[in-house]
Image (cartoon, rainbow, N blue to C red):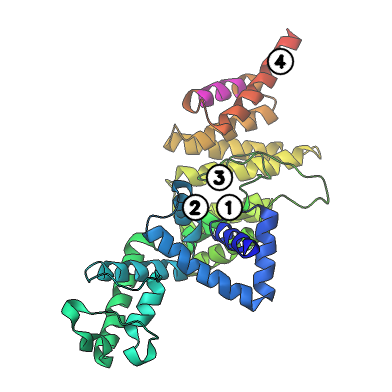
Amino acid sequence: MARQNQQQHSVKRYLLKQLTVAEQHDVELRLLSDDGFAAEVEIAEDELIDEYLDQELSREERVHFEQNFLITPERHSKLITAQAFKRYLERIPPDPSPRKLSIFELLRNWLLPPSQVSGLVVPGPQGRMSVLTSPAAMALTLLVIGILGVIGWRLFIYQSDLQNGLVALNEAYREARPIEARISSLDYAPLVITRSGEPPRVNSFELKRAQIFLDEAEKQQADADSAHALGKLYLLQKDHDKAIEYLQKAAKADTKNAQIYSDLGAAYLEKGRVGLETGKGLDDLGRSLEYLNQALAIEPNLIEALFNRALVHQHQGRDQEAEADWRTYLEKDPSSKWAVEAEDKLKLLEDKKNRSS
């Protein structure tokens, strides 16, 4: 029993993405090879939705449920259906059954004729049982619930391929980022530069999801937003030329988007930084500076562009400009984890100046 409870707890944490990367990977491998375990996970999804609707999750669990569990259309649809049926049940007398049934068990019992339900009959409005057992009524009920679910999902919960792809991309690089530059609208992750031949620190499962979603978004939309998102993905994978290709495509489609120009500057910054190691890269750093200044001309307080411009000036050896940029950045972002990196960069410049004076 203790082992079973431990497994149920582990499955719940898996669904809420509260496991470590290694533990998450182990569960995913078992899902692919164990059909019985996959069925248990599906049941756990239903139970987790029940707990969410019944306010039984902790505050932290609710946040993980909303941000991490509701990432597929199927789960959104389940939630909307369960919400609709729960509202219906709240309008009828309580079930005298001593055992608490999940929303999904009640829904199955409600839709099946009494002859197919073992020991449970759910009363309809004002006790009119014939309404529930009528095939036409059941078909109408299914149709109404389906329509309500789709409408609610599309209006309040639905996420497009583009949104799902960006969420997955952010999740893929949550533990570490592989590039020095800041990319717009992505959360902070510490900079980790791996040695040659060493695999990058990335959640490969989420990265694959991001690639699938964003490729599909580009195929369906082919607009500035989808090209911008793919540019971010290739930049994080250090495919600088591919990143620049998509980001330039995005910039042509949306000429007033400061974040696109900032990310273009980040792509040329990373390409130029690598080029400096082989005695090249100054031209790319110059292009980076042009795009970053263009971003700041549109949106002067865009902190990603300020951060990246300070990096460009520092790599160009223009210490005075870099110092001024870091101080400006820290005025606008004094307390984030990005600010800690900015303070470290500024200290390096100050120490260098003190040594030379």
State the separation of the CA atoms marked 2 and 4.
43 Å
On the image, the x and y values in percent for residue 341 come to 62, 29
Q: Which residue is mark 1?
A: 18
The disc, 4 or 1, on the residue closer to the chain's N-terminal end is 1
Q: Quadrant of residue 266?
A: top right
- Amino acid residing under circle 1: Gln
Please identify the quadrant where the N terminus is shown.
bottom right
Q: Which residue is mark 2?
A: 64
- Amino acid residing under circle 2: His
Q: Residue furthest top?
A: 357
The image's mark for residue 263 is 3
Q: Give SS at disc 1.
A: loop
**Residue 249 visible in this rendered orientation of the protein:** no
Q: Give SS at disc 3.
A: helix
- Amino acid residing under circle 4: Asp
The image's mark for residue 287 is none
Residue 323 covered by magenta stretch = yes
Q: Give SS at disc 2.
A: helix
Query: Marks 1 and 2: CB-CB under 8 Å?
Result: yes
Query: Marks 2 and 4: CB-CB under 8 Å?
Result: no
Report the front residue among 180 and 336: 336
297 left or right, relative to 280: left
